Amino acid sequence: MSDAYDYFREHAIAAVRKARALPRGRPKQKQRTVARVYHLLSKEAALVPNIHHLNDFRAARRLERQIPR
């Protein structure tokens, strides 16, 4: 396994935990979407590690920062 896989997987797990803690509504849906993006990135990184995933990761991080806690 690559380091990118582990890194994205940890972010996916943290995002799912954050989504579970949020009340029902739009922020929870957004957080779950972010978690799905991280999960897909980890799957892709496990198959073919490359730097193209970083732009997607940065976009997901920006979206996650916009979600109120």
Image (spheres, grey):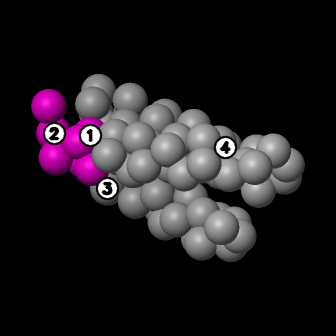
For marks 3 and 1 on the same chain, the one whose residue lies earlier in the sequence: 1
Horizontal and vertical percent for residue 58? 49, 66
How dense is the environment of label 3, judged by Cα within 10 Å: few (below 14), some, or many (20 and up)? few
Q: Which residues are magenta?
A: 1-7
* Label 4 sits on residue: 33
Label 3 or label 2, whichever lies nearer to me, is 2
Whole-number angstrom distance, CA of label 4 to CA of label 3: 22 Å
How dense is the environment of label 1, judged by Cα within 10 Å: few (below 14), some, or many (20 and up)? many
**Three-letter amino acid code at the position of disc 2:** Ser
Mark linked to residue 5: 1
How dense is the environment of label 4, judged by Cα within 10 Å: few (below 14), some, or many (20 and up)? some
* Label 3 sits on residue: 51
* Label 2 sits on residue: 2
Mark 4 in CB contact with mark 1 (< 8 angstroms): no
Horizontal and vertical percent for residue 37? 55, 43
Horizontal and vertical percent for residue 33? 66, 43
Whole-number angstrom distance, CA of label 4 to CA of label 1: 18 Å
Q: Quadrant of the N terminus?
A: top left
For marks 4 and 2 on the same chain, the one whose residue lies earlier in the sequence: 2
Whole-number angstrom distance, CA of label 3 to CA of label 2: 12 Å
Residue 45 visible to an observer of this rendering? yes
Residue located 81% across and 44% down the image: 24
Label 3 or label 1, whichever lies nearer to me, is 1
